[in-house]
Amino acid sequence: MTDAPPTRQATISRTTAETSIDLTLNLDGAGKVEALTGVPFFDHMLHAWGKHARVDLTVNATGDAEMDPHHTVEDVGIVLGQAIREALGDRSGTERYGSAYAPLDEALARVVIDCSGRPFLDFHAAMPESVIGVDFAASLVEEFWRAVAMNAGLTMHIDLIRARNSHHGAEAIFKAAAVATRTAFARTAPPGFVPSTKEVLA
């Protein structure tokens, strides 16, 4: 009987003059999410990502979200990216690549991910409405995923293929990103196998 591989998890705390964030991530979880950021639509998106990525995620954020959600959304992205990087470790044994399409009614999104260790985001999403709900700027979807990619060391290509509703477009992106990350982070190779001809992902 072989021992189960260690759980890939991380806890990160980050405090600035604008926000204070505590985040715990378990990449080998069951989709349990607790998100309290003070930005209800963002909490909804984090729930969607965690559920469909099948990770466990706890986020508590305080700051100036009542003035403008921008700092909270971007800073949570930074901390989530840092937690992903720590939890992935040397990335050995992972599938490395992941891609997914996800629809939500009329909206359709595609996300492609490489756990390359080289941060890059190519984002193409023409949101039909500039504001989602009361005060969530549709542009914050890109800000969040840029922060995640840069801090996690992921190459990400995000395309919103079509949408007539920005809420649907944003949610389709988060769900496609969830399935793509679930695939890319999956342990499908033997322990210690590095999915790179360079023998290192960095």
Image: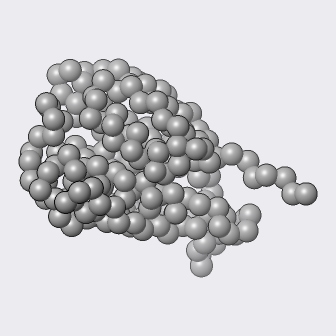
Which residue is drawn at the image coordinates 18% and 28% (left, top)? Answer: 68
Residue 15 image point, x, y percent = 41, 24
Between residues 180 and 121, which one lies in front from this camera angle?
Answer: 180
On the rendered structure, is 66 left or right of 79? left
Q: In which quadrant of the rendered image does the N terminus lie?
A: bottom right
Q: Measured along the vertical axis of the image, is residue 141 above or below residue 156?
A: above
On the rendered structure, is 188 left or right of 25? right
Q: Measured along the vertical axis of the image, is residue 98 above or below residue 65?
A: below
Which residue is drawn at the image coordinates 61% and 64% (left, top)? Answer: 94
Which residue is drawn at the image coordinates 37% and 59% (left, top)? Answer: 176
Between residues 76 and 136, which one lies in front from this camera angle?
Answer: 136
Residue 47 image point, x, y percent = 40, 39
| Extreme residue in the left direction | 129
Q: Is residue 19 visible?
A: no
Q: Is residue 79 visible?
A: yes
Residue 61 image point, x, y percent = 38, 25
Q: Measured along the vertical axis of the image, is residue 154 above or below residue 142?
A: below
On the rendered structure, is 129 left or right of 157? left
Q: Measured along the vertical axis of the image, is residue 182 above or below residue 19?
A: below
Q: Which image quadrant for residue 20? A: top left
Which residue is drawn at the image coordinates 58% and 74% (left, top)? Answer: 196
| Extreme residue in the bottom direction | 197
Residue 113 image point, x, y percent = 42, 64
